[in-house]
Image (cartoon, grey):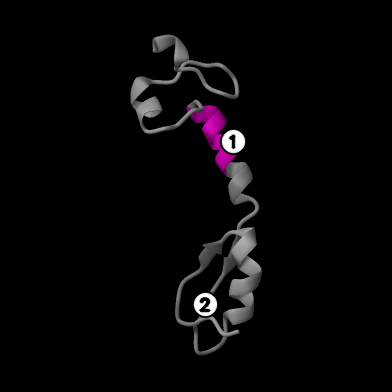
Amino acid sequence: MEDDLQCRMCGAFIAAARWELNYKTCLDCGDLEAVEVRSSWCVLTPHKQGAMFFTPEFAREAAQGINNKGGLIK
């Protein structure tokens, strides 16, 4: 099993505790992957709420439903 604990992107060793949490990348590669994913998120501010992150798939639908009363309206 120790030989299997390698980052799927760069091949570096991954700690067993990290592997058990189902992380298959090292910290450096995981950080790069997370930055890439977060760059596609959209930030919307619903009425009387703080800013929220939405995935690209849901952002268009969420933006259409945000109004001054809050909630999703179709």
Q: Nearer the viewer, residue 68 or 65?
A: 65
Residue 18, given in percent of the width and then of the height, sits at 38, 28
> Pointer 2 and pointer 1: residues touching (CB < 8 Å)?
no
Picture quadrant of residue 14: top left
Residue 52, given in percent of the width and then of the height, sits at 51, 66
Asked which secondary structure carries label 2, the reply is: loop
Does residue 11 belong to the magenta stretch? no
Asked which secondary structure carries label 1, the reply is: helix
Disc nearer the start of the sequence (2/1): 1
Label 2 neighbour load within 10 Å: few <14, some 14-19, many 20+: some
Q: Is residue 48 above or below residue 55?
A: below
Residue sitting at 61 percent across and 57 percent down?
A: 41
Three-letter amino acid code of the residue under disc 1: Leu
Residue sitting at 60 percent across and 24 percent down?
A: 9
CA gap, disc 2 and disc 1: 29 Å
Magenta region = 27-34
Q: Is residue 1 left or right of residue 59?
A: left
Q: Which residue carries the number 2 mark?
A: 46
Three-letter amino acid code of the residue under disc 2: Pro
Residue 29, given in percent of the width and then of the height, sits at 56, 29
Label 1 neighbour load within 10 Å: few <14, some 14-19, many 20+: few
Q: Which residue carries the number 1 mark?
A: 32
Residue 37, given in percent of the width and then of the height, sits at 60, 46
Question: Residue 10 shows which numbered tag?
Answer: none
